[in-house]
Structure formats: structure tokens, C-alpha cells
């Protein structure tokens, strides 16, 4: 569903949408970063050993405290592919909702996706726990196996990239306070 559809269907403020209980605590999505990397018409993915079997994803992971989204995507790509990622631009911001198979936990992810290039793999580095391998696949190969995608955002990011969606890295602003201990100032 695109943003225009969501705005058109937006609930009236102060009214809880049918089927949704009012939250008891402040809701916070899980913020992740992801890298979309193309080389010679193929895209770098990681194959992960999950509780649902071997699944494919972009090199991606959670944003850590004290790091910018760009630092996070560089770190995650290195950890999952043993390759140095050079972000060239911002692809977009994506959201998805997921229910864990084992626990039934309802989770929303907010993904900040970047595109760029990578170095060759460093054989001295080990891949993150759970990552079986990094693999290059064509867009058609990725589209052909949606049941193996760890996240629906894998295909969303790919299609955005192929449609030519691109934003400069300067679209992101990270305040210096992210990199130091909090002061007693008012929140934004």
C-alpha cells in the first residue's frame, strides 16, 4: 500500500481503528539498516540460517546505539558479507510488520535502505553468526523465490532501486548528540 492510499484511508484522530486495541505503552518500531548492492546486474544477498530455515535478505541489521544509519549499514554489511560497503545514496524508508513463528510476537520494522558498492570479500573475516554465505543473484532470481525472502522488504527495496528511486546521503541528518552521552536538554 503506498502513502497516498494510507492517507486516504487514515483514521480520524482520537478514534481507534476497528480491530486495534489502544496501546498501553509507547510503541516503538525496530529500526534496521540495509544495503542494496548491484554489480554487473546481480545483487548481493546473504543467506541466513533462521528458525524458519535458510532465508535470503539484503545485508541488514539493527541500528545500534551511538551510531548513525550510515555507520550502521557499513558495519552490518561488513559483519554479514566480509565486504567493505561504500554507501552512494539513500534508497528509502520502508516499514513491515511481522509475527514471529515461534513466539507469536508482533514486530514492526522500520528499514533505512542504502545503495552502494562493496569491496571484494576479506578472507580473514568471519561472517556473523547465522549467516551461511553471501550470494550474488539477478533480479529475476530474487523475484522467483519470494518464499525464501526473510523480509518482504527485500523485494520492495529491489523494485525501488530498479525503478530508479535514489536520494542523496545528505537527506539524512544525525545530530551530534547521538555520539555522546545525553545532556539534560529537551527532546526534539
Image (spheres, rainbow, N blue to C red):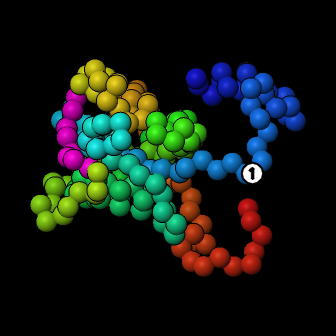
Residue identifier under label 1: 25
Query: Which residue is pictured at 18% across the width and 64% down the height?
Result: 125
Image position of 50 with respect to 161: above or below: below
Q: Quadrant of residue 43?
A: top left
Residue 158 in sight in this render: no
Is residue 133 within the magenta segment?
yes
Residues shaded magenta: 131-138
Front-lying residue, 182 or 160 = 182
In the rendered image, which quarter contains the C terminus? bottom right
Give the structural element (helix, strand or loop) at label 1. loop
Q: Quadrant of residue 21?
A: top right
Q: Could you tell me residue 29's position as x and y percent?
A: 60, 47
Label 1: few (<14), some (14–19) or many (≥20) C-alpha neighbours in 10 Å:
few
Front-lying residue, 48 or 70 = 48
Query: Which residue is pictured at 29% across the width and 24% down the height?
Result: 145
Query: Which residue is pictured at 35% across the width and 36% down the height?
Result: 52
Q: Could you tell me residue 109's position as x and y percent?
A: 53, 43
Amino acid at each position: 500500500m503506498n502513502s497516498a492510499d494510507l492517507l486516504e484511508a487514515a483514521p480520524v484522530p482520537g478514534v481507534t481503528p476497528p480491530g486495534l486495541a489502544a496501546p498501553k505503552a509507547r510503541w516503538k518500531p525496530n529500526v534496521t539498516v540495509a544495503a542494496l548492492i548491484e554489480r554487473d546486474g546481480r545483487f548481493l544477498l546473504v543467506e541466513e540460517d533462521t528458525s524458519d530455515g535458510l532465508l535470503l535478505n539484503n545485508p541488514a541489521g539493527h541500528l545500534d546505539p551511538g551510531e548513525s544509519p550510515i555507520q550502521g549499514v557499513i558495519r552490518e554489511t561488513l559483519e554479514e558479507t566480509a565486504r567493505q560497503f561504500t554507501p552512494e545514496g539513500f534508497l528509502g524508508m520502508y516499514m513491515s510488520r511481522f509475527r514471529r513463528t515461534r513466539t507469536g510476537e508482533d514486530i514492526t520494522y522500520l528499514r533505512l535502505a542504502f545503495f552502494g558498492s562493496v569491496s571484494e570479500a576479506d578472507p580473514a573475516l568471519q561472517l556473523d553468526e547465522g549467516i551461511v554465505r553471501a550470494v550474488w543473484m539477478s533480479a529475476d532470481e530474487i523475484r522467483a523465490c519470494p518464499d525464501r525472502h526473510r523480509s518482504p522488504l527485500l523485494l520492495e527495496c529491489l523494485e525501488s532501486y530498479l525503478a530508479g528511486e535514489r536520494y542523496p546521503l545528505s537527506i539524512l541528518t544525525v545530530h551530534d548528540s547521538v555520539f555522546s552521552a545525553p545532556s539534560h536538554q529537551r527532546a526534539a
